[in-house]
Image (tube, rainbow, N blue to C red):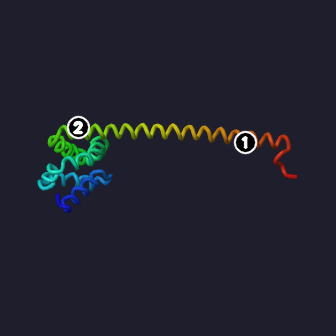
C-alpha cells in the first residue's frame, strides 16, 4: 500500500469515529469509492480491527439516520469481505467494551467508598473538635 493511500485510509478511519456528523458522513461515503474499496480488500486484516469500534459505536448510538445507514453499509462491506475476521474483531471489541464497563464500575465503587470515608473522617474531625472545645483544649485565651 502506498503511503498516500495509507494516509487517506487513516484519515477515513479517524473521521468515522469523530462526533462531527458531517465529517462522519463524508468519511463513510469515501468507503464506497472503488479505489478505497480495493485498498480495503488488500488491507482488510489491518483495517478491520481498527475500524470496528467506530462502526459499532455509530451503529448503536448515532443520532443521524444518514450516518447510521452509511455505517451499516460499510459494516456490511467488511462482513462480506471476510466474515470470520469480522466476527473475531467484533468479539474482541465486545470483550474490550465489557472490560471498560467493569473498570468504570470498579472506579465508581471506589469513588463511593472514598466519599463515605471522607464523610466519616469529616464527621470524626468535627466530633473531635467539639470534644476539645468542651474540655477547654484548642481555645485561645
Q: Quadrant of the N terminus?
A: bottom left
Residues at marks 1 and 2 touching, judged by CB atoms closer than 8 Å: no
Q: Say left or right for 121 vs 140.
A: left
Q: Which residue is mark 1?
A: 126
For label 1, the SS is helix
Rendered location of residue 31, percent (x, y): 18, 52
Tell me the residue at 32%/38% (across/down).
94
Q: Nearer the viewer, residue 119 or 85?
A: 85
User: In the image as oriented, which residue stretches furthest toward the bottom?
Assistant: 4
- Left or right of 113, for residue 51: left
Residue drawn at x 49%, y 39% is 108
Q: Quadrant of residue 81?
A: top left
SS category of the residue bearing label 2: helix
The Cα–Cα distance between marks 1 and 2, rounded to whole angstroms, is 58 Å
Q: Earlier in the sequence, mark 1 or mark 2?
A: 2
Along the viewing direction, whichever of 43 and 114 lies nearer the viewer: 43
Q: Position of residue 132 (x, y in %)?
A: 80, 42
- Residue 89, given in percent of the width and then of the height, sits at 26, 41
Q: Nearer the viewer, residue 59 or 87?
A: 87
Q: Is residue 126 above or below residue 26?
A: above
Q: Circle 2 is placed at which residue position?
A: 87
Specify the label residue 141 is tagged with: none
Q: How many residues crowd around disc 1 within 10 Å: few (fewer than 14), some, or many (20 or more)?
A: few
Amino acid at each position: 500500500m502506498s503511503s498516500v493511500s495509507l494516509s487517506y485510509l487513516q484519515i477515513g478511519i479517524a473521521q468515522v469515529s469523530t462526533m462531527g456528523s458531517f465529517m462522519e458522513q463524508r468519511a463513510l461515503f469515501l468507503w464506497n469509492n472503488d479505489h478505497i474499496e480495493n485498498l480495503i480488500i488488500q488491507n482488510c486484516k489491518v483495517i478491520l480491527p481498527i475500524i470496528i469500534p467506530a462502526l459499532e459505536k455509530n451503529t448503536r448510538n448515532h443520532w443521524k439516520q444518514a450516518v447510521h445507514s452509511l455505517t451499516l453499509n460499510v459494516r456490511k462491506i467488511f462482513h462480506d469481505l471476510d466474515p470470520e475476521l469480522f466476527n473475531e474483531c467484533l468479539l474482541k471489541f465486545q470483550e474490550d467494551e465489557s472490560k471498560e464497563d467493569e473498570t468504570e464500575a470498579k472506579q465508581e465503587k471506589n469513588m463511593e467508598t472514598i466519599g463515605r470515608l471522607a464523610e466519616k473522617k469529616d464527621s470524626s474531625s468535627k466530633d473531635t473538635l467539639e470534644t476539645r472545645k468542651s474540655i477547654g483544649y484548642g481555645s485561645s485565651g
